Amino acid sequence: MQRSSVIEEVIEYFRSPQWRDVLSVVQERDMNHMHVHVDTYLDPGSSFRPLVHDFFQRLGWEAYRPIEIMADKPGRAALYGIQLEDKLNFEIYCRLNDKSVLQPIPAKFGERGGNLRVWSVSDITRFHSQFRWRSLTAADHAAVAAFFESSSHWQRALDYVCDPDVMHVHCNVETSVHPDVLRHYALTNLAKRGFTVKHSIHSIFNAAGYDSGKIIFLGLNPPRTYDIAYYYNPDVLLEVNTQDTHMVGGEGTGNEYYVVRVSTLEAELAKHDLIRLSATEIAHIQDTITTFQTRSAYSWRFVPVDAASASD
């Protein structure tokens, strides 16, 4: 493919309805999390990541942690942890497709029949409401606190968080304790251990068609995103998970943990002759796509230029 065609396809993506939806969702309140699914053959680290980072920076939206690159499935990679101040965090999942430079993935290859999935706060509270959470006694509270203070399961999860070869980990638990309580005791314990967490939010993730609950920890020290994934069992207080998680990950993955490794990413990217954009090309693309949106005349949001013109 000619270089000019490569540049033009990248530019057109940032004019696409999918990217417009991304920009709109990022600016909404009461949004929880978002997954964006694309087909691309751009090198995710050297080319796609700076395009996304610089796009938001030019809007004045600073990231409080660098975007990471993750590979959790064969033939795929992700811009993992796009974390903008005062906005929802999200991921862009990439199918490494040598027939595309950068395009929205066909919906059937995305998630739940779409190439953009968004969770709202009401989605999470509705998910929580389907379970009969236990009314805790003082002894129950003490047992939950002890799980985070001294259990080998939680300690092993934090060992994974600090492992330089681990990009992401779920500490999987089986429980009847409300996630608010788990979050409280986990954050208390993390602070005691010297971990710094920017924010911790309730969310949902999907594995093989099954929605499960999780608590996301957006860490600053160490700079990792890690989760407690909980599987409801009315008969237990808080234990190591034994249920099928439907998750496939790297070494260490099972019912107890889900692990994504940096070494998996390196092995995956080595299989592909990816497109690498020069600094000059990236700057040209940014100069062009910056003109695609403007500040709304009616609110604090950025809107597409043609939408702004239509309202005049």
Image: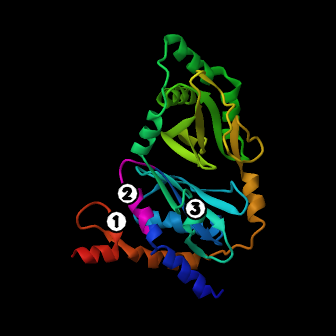
Q: Which mark is residue 110?
A: 3
Question: Dot 1: what SS?
Answer: strand
| Real-space CA distance between mark 1 and mark 2, rounded to the nearest whole angstrom | 8 Å
Residue visible at 64% across and 65% down in the picture? 95
Q: Is residue 246 part of the magenta span, yes or no?
A: no
Amino acid type of the residue that numbered disc 3 sits on in the rendered structure:
Gly
Q: Residue at x 58, y 16 (%)?
A: 143
Res 170 quadrant in image: top right
Reading the image, the residue beneath label 1 is 302
Quadrant for the C terminus, please.
bottom left
Viewer-closest of 184 and 177: 177
- Can you tell which quarter of the image residue 306 is in? bottom left
Inspect the image, locate mark 2, and give the three-letter code of the amino acid beneath it.
Answer: Gln
Q: Position of residue 125 (x, y in %)?
A: 42, 38
Q: Residue at x 72, y 41 (%)?
A: 163
- Name the residue that disc number 2 marks: 27
Q: Is residue 25 magenta?
A: yes
Residue 76: where, in percent of width, then height? 68, 62
Residue 176 coordinates in the image, percent (x, y):
55, 25
| Disc 1 and disc 3 in contact, CB within 8 angstroms | no
Q: Which tag, 1 or 3, sits closer to the chain's start?
A: 3
- In the rendered structure, which segment of residues is drawn in magenta? 20-32
Name the kind of residue labelled 1 in the image: Phe
**C-alpha gap between disc 1 and disc 3:** 26 Å
User: Quick check: 108 left or right of 64?
Assistant: right
